[in-house]
Amino acid sequence: MHNVGQFQSQIDPQPGQHPLPVRNVIEMEALFRRPSGELLVAGASAAWRKLLLQAEMAAPHVQIASIEGESGVGKQTLARYLLSRSPLRGSEFHRRDAREWLLTEGELATQSGFTYLDRVDMLAAPGQGLLLAVLKNLQDRAPGRLMLVASSETPLRQMAAQGQLLPDLAFRLTAVRFAIPSLRARREDIAPIAQALLDRICARYQHRPMTLSPGALGRLLQHPWPGNVRELASVLEAALLEAGGDVIRPDDLALHPGTESGREAEPLNRGGDLSLDEMIRRHVQFVLDLNHGNKLRAARQLRISRSTLYRILGNHSVLSR
């Protein structure tokens, strides 16, 4: 197996749960695919761009990899991106739930193609032993015929250190490891992901295109997102059905404060102004900086008028709009 380096993130996400329902995983993943079948990988943060670059580097060579991150953070999306950049592109995406492991060692070891093994952190000791035996058999296989990507909500090396996972299994799974930060830890991604999701949801409902008002975007930026991207998709789908026009406004968003797991929301900074108006101003300034001060281009990306952009930069409130 090729070792493509230690693809480590500085952030080790903790398990979380989302408070809003999504009908099923397949439907959630469909929101990230264009009509052409191309995968949507929206995001502007340095952390997300780094993950995509690591995936580009690893995909042509890797046979075994792990993706770690909270529930709903986008582990399947990144796994599909890996597949799309690998020699197996075009192959079927086989998803297996590790908690319902029914395959024998020989059956998996003789397979070819792409296998996404979900929630390996939930495997009991017998299942861990079976998976370890499979990985040992795979190490002598020629690259390019099979890729196994395991997902976990808990860092696997941490589990091994705590005696909850076989150390040899953890080492083999994490030789190539992708750790996806929570959505609240990469807030720059909220706006592009939200608009990409909204476009997909509108297409699925055969609804005319919709945009987010600055006030609605401000609420999205300030929410802690315990359910990550899955929760965001659920909130936007409900908002589309609630909104009366072509713009989603703050009152259309069914955002619930707090988290089911009891964690406190992570502040954007340790002090200063944390009002919604200030959050909106910061995001607009961020997009403006990305466009090197080009206000017309920034306004187009934000899907607001230049007059609205000038008003935000001039510290005028936009929450009532």
Image: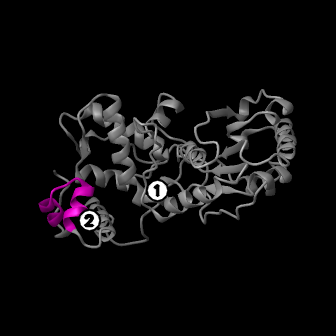
| Membership of 46 in magenta stretch | no
Q: Please say if the residues under marks 1 and 2 sit with CB atoms less than 8 Å apart.
A: no
| Membership of 309 in magenta stretch | yes
Assign a secondary structure to mark 1. helix
Assign a secondary structure to mark 2. helix
What amino acid is labelled 2 in the image? Answer: Arg
Picture coordinates of residue 104, whole percent (x, y): 83, 29
51 to the left or right of 245 = right
Q: Residues within 10 Å of mark 1 (few under 14, many from 20)?
A: many
54 to the left or right of 217 = right
Mark 1 or mark 2: whose residue is earlier in sequence: 1
Give, as a single range, the part of the protein colored magenta.
295-312
Asked if 269 appears above or below 51 in the picture, the reply is below
Q: Nearer the viewer, residue 145 or 293?
A: 145
Q: Which residue is mark 2?
A: 281
| Coloring applied to the structure | one colour
